[in-house]
Image (cartoon, grey):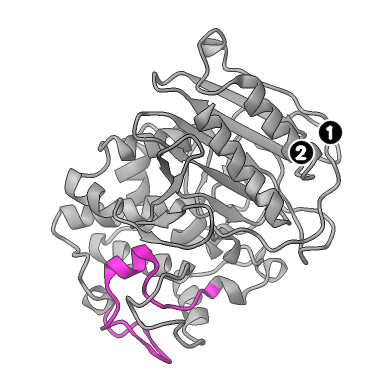
Amino acid sequence: MSAAAAVAIAVMTPGALAPPAASATSAVSDSTASAAAAARPDAVQQALNSLVREDGLPAALASVQDRSGRTRTYTAGVADLATGSKVPRDGQVRMGSNTKTFTAVVVLQLVAEGKVGLEDHVDTHLPGLVRGEGIDGRNITVRQLLQHTSGLPDYGSHIDDDEIRYRYAEPRDLLDIALKYPADAAPGKTWGYSNTNYILAGLIIQKVTGRPLAEEIDRRIVKPAGLRDTYFPAPGDMTIREPHPKGYHRSPADGPLREFTEMDPSWGWAAGQLISTNSDLNRFFGALLAGRLLPAAQLAEMRTTVAVGGPSGLRYGLGLTSRTLSCGGVYWGHGGDIAGFETRGGVTDDGRAANVAVTSIPSTAAAAKHVSDAVDGALCG
């Protein structure tokens, strides 16, 4: 999959497994070492170990929080396949499509402020910008963008990781790619994941606020929620700032793993550019679901979901997903894939939280399911 296409939350296409990485290690926050964990430590650690040993992922990291807010962190595998160095505890990763939830929150804050309406058409804010075969911004609403029911084609399906790795893209470049192709469906007729929706959401944010998207996310979400390790890379910043495991990528899907940590993430922009940690993602989704980032009316809109299909019970709201738990109930989150990294996780209504990151997009459907299963085990343990 291309880097931008890989920010989708779908199960990956089957392919060859990665070679086994080194043995797993566990890391527990000193301040919470004696606290009761939200899940059995051995169960979470064993799940990460299996992702490395059985599914061939170079490294796996997790952060698990119980109902009282006590946190335990885990690592398995190695940060660097060449040197065998240890995985940094709660290291930074590219968070891929979790960025969409941040973008949606900003849009919904603007809705609460009366500056944007969910039933506004795209042309209300971006007149004449969205035109193509079967595509007309006068017929697509802001709600349909956030819910992936716009029918817009996904630009990410038409780019190649290696070609874009070191190239900068403006948001309108991404939109231009999408508009070369016909609509996937008429607006409002069906659910279909498209990164293009969130490029337009980001452009609406910038048009309405008169400020860069990165500034609005930082001002409205990152600082108020106390996210210490989350940031929107500046133009030209192809690195990950703080301690992090290296990311690895297969292209084609049955090819060898290649180190892919450095890349220009502008191809993800409002759909997938942010960098974060598992603990910060837990903190963000916890603050969101607790009503600290949105008024009750907008949070209720965000949590109003449509069925995605498939056996996982996954449903999609406005930049937020719900997934059924094996122990009953659901958890709320998103997930993200971008070349080199995959993240899965979320929070429950009673305050449990778990996020898992791996340092390569799983190359088989079974491996992808094992990452989601690790989250389920952490929340249900």
Q: Amino acid at mark 1?
A: Ala
Give the labeled residue for mark 2: 52
Quadrant location of residue 226?
A: top left
Disc 2 versus disc 1: nearer the observer = 2
Q: Amino acid at mark 2?
A: Val
Give the labeled residue for mark 1: 22
Residue stretch rendered in magenta on the structure: 126-155
- Asked if residue 259 is positioned above or below residue 200 in the image, the reply reads above
The answer to which of 98 and 263 lies nearer the viewer is 98
Q: Reading the chain from its start, which is encountered first: label 2 or label 1? A: 1
Horizontal and vertical percent position of residue 350: 35, 29
Q: Residue furthest bottom?
A: 133
Circle 1 residues within 10 Å: few <14, some 14–19, many ≥20: many
Helix, strand or loop at label 1? It is: loop
- Asked if residue 65 is positioned above or below residue 222 in the image, the reply reads above
Residue at image location 74% in from the left, 32% down from the top: 49
Residue at image location 47% in from the left, 52% down from the top: 313
Q: Mark 2–mark 1 contact, CB under 8 Å?
A: yes
Q: What is the tally of numbered marks visible in this picture? A: 2
Q: Magenta stretch: dominant SS?
A: loop
